[in-house]
Image (cartoon, rainbow, N blue to C red):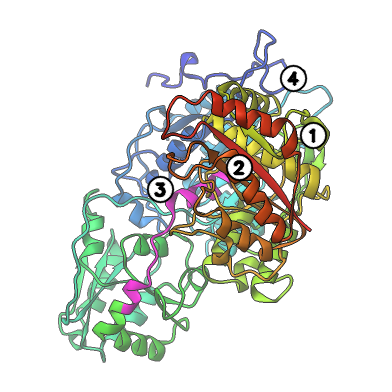
């Protein structure tokens, strides 16, 4: 076999061996790369045969998303697919996922020398991610990681260069006491890597039992299903249930089929690649005369474009699993508008709201399951549950997942984690024993106030201080706070060390943008400070001033301020605030008058509210924002807004006189301006007006920072 991983195919931008004194981001010529602060060089080792391996869809999507996030990614895979089948990701083989372009098929299952050669050529990366390690592939993965220098071998000697982080991503159930040989194999891998990423609390416990030193938990983001869904409409015929079954998860299915005997208004389709004894068992259960031919078994693999159509042809997704090693099934059903019928076991307990977007029944309770099936036989109940289904936010799910991956892959983790650091972080939607420590670029341990922010905001909503985010908060607010906390608790990147004194005086809390050069200067300064990239110069100008105001006026040094960013999850401010250690709650509002009223928080419970470009205020809604902020902000709280300035004919714009009127109304509501409107700000508004070229377009942007008395 030709060595597919040639020297020319090494990940670009890698560091050379023997350059241990070279700082990260510095090239061989001694210059500093522009992206050196955030971009990682990541090698993913895992299945990539999309047509034949069930975990390949997740591996390819992970590679695509990491690459889209700006990282240098190489996918190293096998020359031929595995014959072993995964049970946790059976639906993944029916996905519309494009192959990752930088895929190198270098590993042969019968050639150990290929494992070592591939590993040696990965010594220059920041992290090696091993996805879905089957027991039969453990020797290969161990040899590859050893050759790459990515195994835990005690503290690094003084002066030694950085080594790659080693992360194992477990998609399937880990072997337990019933499979001791497989357990010992997997344990020999998990005990030698830096981190293990799992997707349920049960998997986390199993990983620790197998010797994993550092375990993180993150929910599996849903994957796109190919094809077009079928229109369901309103029907009175028997309720059509769909169960996506896989090997090793048939006990709950047997309970479901027994319950169906006494509910004639329900039919069931069982889809999934079932073989051997599993196929025979399902066939016997489905042939029960008491079921009257209402069970259809599709044991053959579905084509890649067939899963969406199959989901669309049914009314309810049934998840009759007594335990669930995967967390993406509920999202898959909701993505296609299907309510879910599931046993009340983690993670379904937290993903399905009983009676709203599905039904939960006690685990292994045939009588309760029969009652649930009878309820689903009512067309009005089915319709109400379908209307309650909310489409999952795929981008947010992947953002949280990548945040965890990036944290575990960051080279700085080696400096903070000793050889036996067993900190069991269980974040991204799961309560854990601890939230870990985040390492700043300077190598110092930062202590962001993310958990404090979450407790305060959830407490203001529910009236219970210290309410656990994953377990007790519910609804839209809890989802928003979980998203905010997971961004910081998962640590998308090593924290940027930024103090108020690091910002020059020309970055003002209240200011006017009238010239393009001002926005360019703001964006360049953000890169010098090490903040994440922004392609929008105006958004960078707006966000930099808002961040400066927060740091100078509201930061207590612990980054614990409760910040609500009305610009959405992709706003520049939220990204920068997370980068320096805050946990902003980023919200995408809809409607004519978006406001913090949608949060339904207690009076005076927020520290900062931000409404800035490109989702800033205009002349029509600025008063509404002021009114809402006047009761939501506590004493000393900040409101930062941007408003376009321009002639009266410009839609949504205000003039210099209107700005003074806004400040007068704000003063009546208990706000004082942070900054000096009578100084340079007013003069710059006038200069911007003098350069206006059109009578119907804004000629500038004013940023107002107001403090609650």
Q: Secondary structure at mark 2?
A: helix
Location of residue 321 (image quadrant): bottom left
Q: Nearer the viewer, mark 2 or mark 3?
A: 2
Which numbered disc, 3 or 1, marks the residue that appears first in the sequence?
Answer: 3
Q: Which residues are magenta?
A: 384-403
**Residue under circle 4?**
20
Label 1: few (<14), some or many (≥20) within 10 Å? some
| Image mark for residue 26 | none
Q: Is residue 380 left or right of residue 662?
A: left
Q: Nearer the viewer, residue 150 or 680?
A: 680
Q: Nearer the viewer, mark 1 or mark 4?
A: 1
Q: Nearer the viewer, residue 640 or 533?
A: 640
Q: Judge whether 655 appears above or below 228 on screen.
A: above
Q: Is residue 47 left or right of residue 229?
A: right
| Pointers 2 and 3 in contact (C-beta within 8 Å) | no
393 part of magenta stretch: yes
Residue positioned 37% across, 69% down in the render: 389
């Amino acid at each position: 076999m030709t060595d597919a991983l040639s020297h020319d195919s090494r990940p670009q931008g890698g560091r050379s061996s023997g350059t241990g004194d070279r700082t990260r981001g510095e090239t061989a010529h001694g210059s500093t790369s522009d992206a050196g602060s955030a971009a990682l060089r990541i090698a993913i080792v895992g299945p990539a045969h999309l047509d034949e391996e069930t975990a390949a869809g997740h591996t390819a999507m992970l590679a695509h998303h990491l690459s889209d996030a700006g990282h240098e990614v190489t996918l190293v895979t096998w020359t031929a697919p595995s014959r072993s089948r995964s049970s946790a990701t059976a639906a993944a083989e029916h996905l519309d996922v494009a192959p990752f372009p930088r895929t190198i098929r270098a590993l042969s299952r019968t050639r150990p020398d290929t494992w070592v050669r591939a590993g040696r050529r990965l010594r220059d990366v920041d992290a090696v991610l091993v996805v879905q390690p089957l027991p039969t592939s453990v020797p290969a993965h161990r040899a590859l990681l050893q050759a790459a220098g990515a195994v835990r071998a005690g503290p690094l000697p003084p002066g030694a260069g950085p080594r790659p982080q080693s992360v194992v991503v477990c998609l399937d159930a880990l072997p337990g006491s019933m499979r001791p040989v497989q357990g010992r194999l997997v344990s020999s891998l998990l005990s030698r890597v830096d981190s293990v990423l799992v997707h349920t609390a049960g998997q986390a416990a199993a990983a620790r039992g197998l010797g994993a030193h550092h375990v993180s938990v993150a929910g599996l983001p849903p994957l796109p299903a190919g094809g077009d869904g079928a229109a369901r409409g309103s029907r009175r015929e028997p309720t059509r249930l769909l169960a996506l079954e896989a090997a090793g998860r048939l006990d709950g299915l047997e309970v479901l089929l027994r319950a169906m005997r006494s509910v004639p208004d329900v039919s069931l389709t069982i889809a999934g690649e079932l073989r051997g004894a599993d196929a025979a068992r399902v066939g016997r259960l489905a042939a029960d005369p008491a079921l009257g031919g209402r069970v259809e078994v599709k044991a053959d693999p579905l084509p890649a474009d067939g899963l969406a159509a199959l989901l669309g042809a049914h009314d309810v997704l049934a998840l009759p699993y007594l335990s669930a090693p995967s967390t993406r099934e509920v999202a898959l059903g909701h993505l296609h508008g299907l309510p879910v019928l599931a046993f009340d076991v983690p993670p379904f307990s937290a993903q399905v709201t009983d009676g709203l977007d599905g039904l939960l029944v006690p685990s292994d309770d045939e009588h309760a399951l029969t009652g649930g099936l009878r309820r689903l036989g009512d067309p009005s109940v089915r319709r109400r549950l379908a209307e309650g289904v909310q489409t999952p936010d795929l981008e947010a799910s992947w953002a949280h997942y990548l945040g965890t991956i990036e944290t575990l892959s960051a080279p700085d983790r080696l400096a903070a984690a000793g050889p036996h650091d067993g900190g069991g972080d269980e974040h991204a939607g799961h309560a854990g024993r601890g939230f870990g420590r985040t390492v700043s670029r300077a190598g110092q341990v930062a202590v962001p106030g993310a958990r404090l922010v979450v407790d305060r905001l959830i407490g203001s909503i529910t009236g219970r201080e210290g309410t656990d985010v994953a377990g007790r908060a519910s609804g839209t607010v809890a989802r928003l706070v979980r998203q905010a906390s997971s961004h910081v608790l998962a640590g998308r990147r090593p924290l940027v060390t930024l103090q108020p004194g690091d910002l020059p005086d020309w970055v003002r809390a209240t200011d006017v943008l009238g010239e393009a050069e001002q926005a360019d200067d703001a964006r360049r300064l953000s890169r010098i400070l090490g903040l994440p990239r922004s392609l929008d110069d105006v958004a960078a100008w707006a966000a930099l001033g808002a961040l400066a105001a927060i740091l100078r006026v509201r930061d207590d040094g612990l980054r614990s301020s409760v910040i609500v960013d009305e610009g959405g999850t992709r706003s520049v401010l939220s990204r920068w605030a997370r980068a320096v250690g805050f946990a902003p709650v980023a919200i995408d509002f809809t409607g004519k008058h978006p406001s913090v009223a949608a949060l339904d928080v207690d009076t005076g419970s927020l520290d900062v509210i931000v409404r800035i470009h490109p989702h800033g205020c205009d002349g029509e809604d600025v008063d509404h924002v002021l009114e809402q902020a006047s009761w939501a902000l506590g004493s000393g709280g900040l409101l930062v807004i941007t408003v376009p300035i321009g002639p009266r004919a410009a839609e949504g714009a205000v003039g210099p006189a209107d700005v003074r009127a806004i400040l007068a109304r704000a003063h009546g509501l208990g706000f004082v301006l942070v900054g000096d409107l009578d100084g340079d700000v007013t003069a710059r508004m006038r200069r911007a007006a003098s350069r206006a070229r059109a009578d119907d377009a804004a000629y500038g942007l004013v940023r107002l920072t107001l403090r609650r008395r």
